Amino acid sequence: MTTGAVTPEDDKSHATNAWEALPRMAPLRVPLRRRLQTLALFWWGIEPAVAVGFFLCLCTMPVLWPILIIYLIWMLTDKAPSRGGRRSVWIRNWRLWKYFVEYFPVEIVKTSDLDPSKNYIFGYHPHGIIAIGAIATFSSEGTGFSKLYPGIHASLLTLASNFNLPLHRDYLLACGLCSVSKDSCKYILKSGPGRSIAIVVGGATESLNARPGVMDLTLKKRFGFVKIAVQTGANLVPVLSFGENEIYDQVKNEKGSRLRLFQKRLQQVFGFTMPLFHGRGVFNYDMGLMPHRRPMNIVIGEPIEPPKDFDESNIDKVVQELHAKYIQSLKDIYEKYKDVYFKDRIKDLEFVE
């Protein structure tokens, strides 16, 4: 996929003098396809604000109030986010997603086939700033996931609070997203063969460690998704994204710093945190909230089958053993592909917290 390849302008190192420190402006004449790729990312970034803003505009029209009230009541009682979602094949196949994927580009590295008669829990690592690779892979067909893994219908899971925004929630559901609650996970995994979930395991905590050349995974104490695999019989599939941490730069926030303490406090209060990051802009290469055009290679590993027969009273030991196998599988993937897709690393893979 060469249309979204990294250009010298996108991949320049840090400036060496005052003149070079100025934002590098994008040229006016670029291929139409690259403009469409940028537009796809721009739309993805502003869509929540557009959806909510449009809803608020509708609220200014009294004639629509009865309809809007009915919609809000339905939204508050709708169980779709925790009951398998409401995906739209049409929306997931929008041409927009192809441009979205080509922007970086994002490519899946398939290591084995998956039996469509089984269920799977895809553990996506690292979280990065916004887990864009997970969105590209599991909430659309931009990477061709369904063609690579026929019969596997994976739902990307996110915080339940994301389904509280009117209209935006319906867009998320159409893309196949569901709530990350325990009940939602089990409901999906028990709803039929091939039904699977994708969890960005590191979550908000891991986003604070996201920076180019580093892959620190928050996984040592994350046993919940493994326990669900044991309880439902779903296979664990490790997914390691080489490039997720490279698409944004983050302000230094070492452990113990005031900024880090503030971010952790924010997470404790609201359930999410806010990394201070920047990428590029629509018209420049150095300042803005658009991600950099840097390739993401997403390696989907081999499935790890949980034990079928075990003593329920000994489930914690079973979970810990399966968790250890999962970590080892991630290590194996990293060692195999680090010199192919992670050549500019500052340090090697590390499991933290």
Image (cartoon, rainbow, N blue to C red):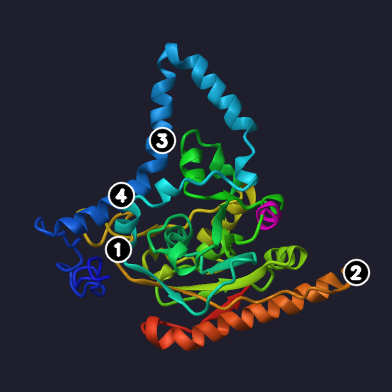
Which range is magenta? 185-191
Please tell me whether mark 1 sits on a helix, a strand or a loop.
helix
Please tell me whether mark 3 sits on a helix, a strand or a loop.
helix
Residue bearing the label numbered 2: 313
The quarter of the rendered structure image containing the N terminus is bottom left
The numbered disc on residue 42 is 4
Residue bearing the label numbered 1: 102
Percent across and percent down for residue 232 are: 74, 63
Specify whether residue 257 is in view.
no
Q: Specify the amino acid type for callout 2.
A: Ser
Query: How much space separates mark 1 and mark 4, taking CA atoms?
Result: 14 Å
Q: Earlier in the sequence, mark 3 or mark 2?
A: 3
User: Do callouts 3 and 2 mark residues in contact (Cβ within 8 Å)?
Assistant: no
Observer-nearest residue: 182 or 24? 182
The numbered disc on residue 51 is 3
Query: How much space separates mark 2 and mark 1, taking CA atoms?
Result: 49 Å
Q: Is residue 8 magenta?
A: no
